[in-house]
Image (cartoon, rainbow, N blue to C red):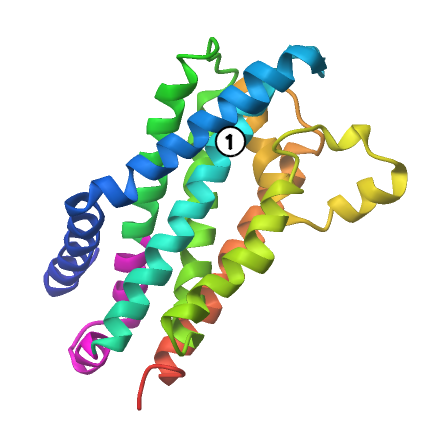
Amino acid sequence: MIRYQNRVALSSILHKEVHRFTRIWVQTLVPPAITISLYFVIFGSLIGSRIGQMDGFDYMAFIVPGLIMMSVITNSYSNVASSFFSAKWQRNVEEMLVAPVPNWVIVAGYVGGGMCRGILVGLIVTCIAMLFTDIQIHNIAVVIITVMLTSAVFALGGLINAIFAGSFDDISIIPTFILTPLTYLGGVFYSISLLPDFWQGVSQINPIVYMVNAFRYGFLGISDVSLTMAFSVIGTFLLVLYSVAMYLISKGIGLRS
């Protein structure tokens, strides 16, 4: 059972994080909705009508899970990266480090805030998707578990990025040069079974492939990878990133002047 003071600290950090992005919802929630709407119009309606079906499903229905997951990934990551770096830049993190609060509470508070934003944006995108196609759910448990784990993985990634960042420009390097390419090459817009054997093998080292396919299985019941393998990869990344984040904060790496 969590001690009372830890519950208070965790709820305080989480409340601050949620209030932070909901207070400026025009900047944090509306732009992703507009961007994804353009994806639906361009890739779903215009290009999708020429492509036809993908793995036995209408192309619009095929890309919906991937686009939802893409919005969850980017928003979970960016929320924690920007928020934690701002706290580090303003010296707020140093106050938390000297307070009688376990490091896991700090990690859980920031990651929880990132998950809230990522999942909320995912729900908004899902509602928008209903305007373009019929949403069907094959396995609701897989959908919920996948989106929760994936959101946590990238929220932790954003936290680690913020710890090492030396300026506000540094928190955009990973999303621009690593996260965005991996997302677009993660099977959001296509089935990796369409790729030549060599590129199918290359795609299997991309962790986002497993996240997108597990999420797509929850909606459509199809996947390019084993569901067991997908959850194993996601779980491994979650444990590794959590361990790294805890180590960095416990040692004060990138946090103490």
Q: Quadrant of residue 160?
A: bottom left
Residue 111: image location, x then y, percent:
33, 55
Which image quadrant: the C terminus?
A: bottom left
Q: Name the residue under label 1.
A: 67
Q: Main secondary structure of the magenta part?
A: helix
Position of 223 with respect to 133 (left or right) is: right
The single residue placed furthest to the right in the displayed view is: 197
Q: Does the magenta stretch include residue 30?
A: no
Disc 1 residue type? Leu
Please provide the residue range marked out in magenta.
91-111
Residue 160 seen by the camera: no
Residue 121: image location, x then y, percent:
34, 35
**Closest to the observer: 247 or 25?**
25
Position of 240 with respect to 248 (left or right) is: right
Q: Is residue 191 above or below residue 154?
A: above
Q: Is residue 96 magenta?
A: yes
